[in-house]
Amino acid sequence: MLPVFKAQLKKDIRSPWTVILMIVGSMLLTFIFADTDQQSKIDVPIFSSESNKEEVEEKWELLLNNNQGYSFVVTDEKEARAEVEEGDSEAALQLFDNDYQVIAAADSRAVQLLEDYVHTVFTQEAQLRAAAGSENVEATRNEVDVYLENAPLQMQIESIEGGEVPEHNMILQLLFGITLFLSMFTIGFKVNGVTSDKVSGVWDRMILSPTSKTGMYTGHLFYSFFIGFTQIFIVLVLFHYVLDYDLGYHFGMILTVAAVFAISMVSVSMLITGFVKTPEQFNMIYTSVIPIIPIISGVYMPPGLISNPILLFVADLFPLAHAMEALMDIALFDAGWSEITLPLVLMLLIGVISMGVGVNLVERRKD
Amino acid sequence: MIEINKLTKSFKGKKVVEDVDIYMDEGESIGLLGPNGAGKSTTISMISSLLKPTSGDVKLNGKSTIKNPAEIRRILGVVPQEIALYEELSAHENLKFFGEIYGVKRNVLEQRIQNVLDMVGLKKRQKELVKTFSGGMKRRVNIAAALLHNPEILILDEPTVGIDPQSRSHILETVKKLNRENGTTVLYTSHYMEEVEQLCERVYIMDHGRVVAAGSKEELLSILSSEDTIQINLSDTNDEVVEKIKSIKNIRRVDETKNGIRIISKKGSNILSDLVHAVESEGIHLTNFQMETPSLEDVFLHLTGRTLRD
Ligand SMILES: Nc1ncnc2c1ncn2[C@@H]1O[C@H](COP(=O)(O)OP(=O)(O)OP(=O)(O)O)[C@@H](O)[C@H]1O
Ligand SMILES: [Mg+2]
């Protein structure tokens, strides 16, 4: 086993670029994805042409921006209209003292959603003004806020252990997801070494040597695990210790999940090896199947968005969904070993079954 | 030492090797000749225990190797037809890898590596990557990798295909040396008749999965003892003149080759005057006439009606 492992390692030391590229890629993609996620607020230009222009704009800018989805920006009227005309903005908003007008090029769904939102803000403000009557509007606003905080009917959300529910952290999810995603490629390409050896004839030479079949497989597969896990390890260490990302307090547990994931992916790659004759075929199948997995496993979206039972079932057949679940539970909810046992066991199960079927298929096609 | 009985292999019902009998004594050098697709590589795979025969047996010192291949694997060195190396590694790294999987002891491995590199003449370039080597150099490393564990029997599957003359003669010398000086038993596969003539004491000729002739070079040539081979050149040729030559008494075969026309006739029959007559009657002159000593190539042609490299 050791000579096989060493030979693969030497090959990668000779040309380490794939692994380095994957590490750099993991980090770059995380930055890019995480960044676009933050900028996902829609910019809406607002302006007023009233005589007390500044006052009106300032008042509504404050009230309108009290939300998650839109960012209302005071803009010069001409500019705002031009932005809409040229399609840079979906819509702009002309403000009056107590009214507004949506300026849009087309009546799209996005414009309707914006209109709904703006309508709510203006209606609420009108109600508040009516309630305040002759009194100071700001005082009434405060009263209402205080009342709402101690309302007779309240909804409280708690996590299962009774703690507070941390906000879902999309950046963290992307960081884990992309890191594992790119490690799948590294692992697959290394497992493909088995097929390369078969095609080149090196495999037959090993069969004629006193090295056992088990030794040949474990040499290749253990190396694939080693290099895949090392890649994940380096990326996570860089994020956690060098770039100061908060991965929770249980780094050791995170690494354990990553290791089990890597083992499981080695097996899945072996399963695919069972269906191919040449390394080129493997690359073709592998690179077209793997990118689908994070999509159906919901890596790129906030949790709960995928509800199609078939997609959920297919996602569960691959280790990624289970690894993501365990990693997020550890990093966000301080989950203990007992809470991540199920995903770990499922990954190992996938591993054992794929490995068994894969090796059998490979050995069967001999004669 | 090795005895092969009625070895047969079918792929999907098609017999590619059929009833092959071969024996090899210790220290012998055996040639296995045959055109493309004759079944040489398949036979070798079965002898070396990589492929299970459909029927028949391979025995090492009287014991069947099919159920228990460990013994034959231990004393066997196989040079595969294709280059089976890690191209991304250097020659030295490749040899180290193959030495290790063969369990060559660590303290003698480096010495062995230098020995075999010396044998194939690549000592100076051992640190270079195999993928930067010429075809001939790759073939030499391919051979070296099979020598690291000092095999008693060496099987080479067309080790000189498509390489430069220099590498080729180096390889032939190496094999000859191993056989004559180290007493290594050699099974040498080729479709170059000259190599086998030069290297091997006994030859098996395969065609369409069967052994069509076997024996020492002299024995094989005696198959042709009833025939003469004559090479002629004409000032001009056409179909009529070839037909005329064919119809001459005692001429058995006429083939147009790139060197002229080859005639096979009954031994000792005097055909020269008939030949001159036939040619001149077509207004053509005989420019060259040569009796040839027959080669194994001619034996092959005689047995199969094909040249080796058809
Ligand atoms: N695994 C296989 N499945 C089906 N047919 C095969 C297989 N291996 C070899 N053959 C067929 O068996 C025949 C003999 O092949 P083999 O490789 O033994 O010939 P060879 O004498 O070594 O030829 P060459 O000089 O081209 O190497 C060929 O027709 C080949 O197509
Ligand atoms: Mg062959």
Image (cartoon, grey):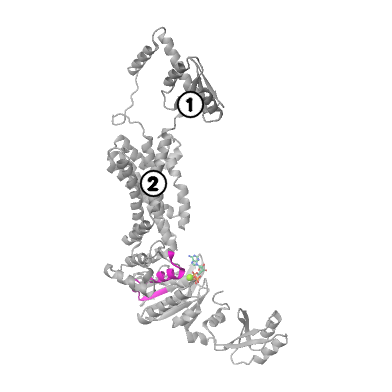
- Residue drawn at (36%, 39%) of the image: A325
Residue B259: horizontal and vertical position, in percent?
60, 81
Give me the residue at 35% from left, 22% from top.
Answer: A155
Identify residue for label 1: A44
Of the 4 image quadrants, the one containing the N terminus of chain B is bottom left
Q: Residue B217: give x, y in percent of width and height.
A: 48, 84
In this view, the residue in front, A231 or A192, is A231
How many numbered marks have been drawn onto this rendered protein structure?
2
Residue type at mark 1: give it.
Val
> Which corner quadrant holds the C terminus of chain B?
bottom right
Nearest to the observer: residue A6 or residue A49: A49
Residue B149 sits above or below residue A307 on the image: below
**Helix, strand or loop for disc 2:** helix
**Which element carries disc 1, helix, strand or loop?**
strand
Q: Nearer the viewer, residue B19 or A240?
A: A240
A190 drawn magenta: no
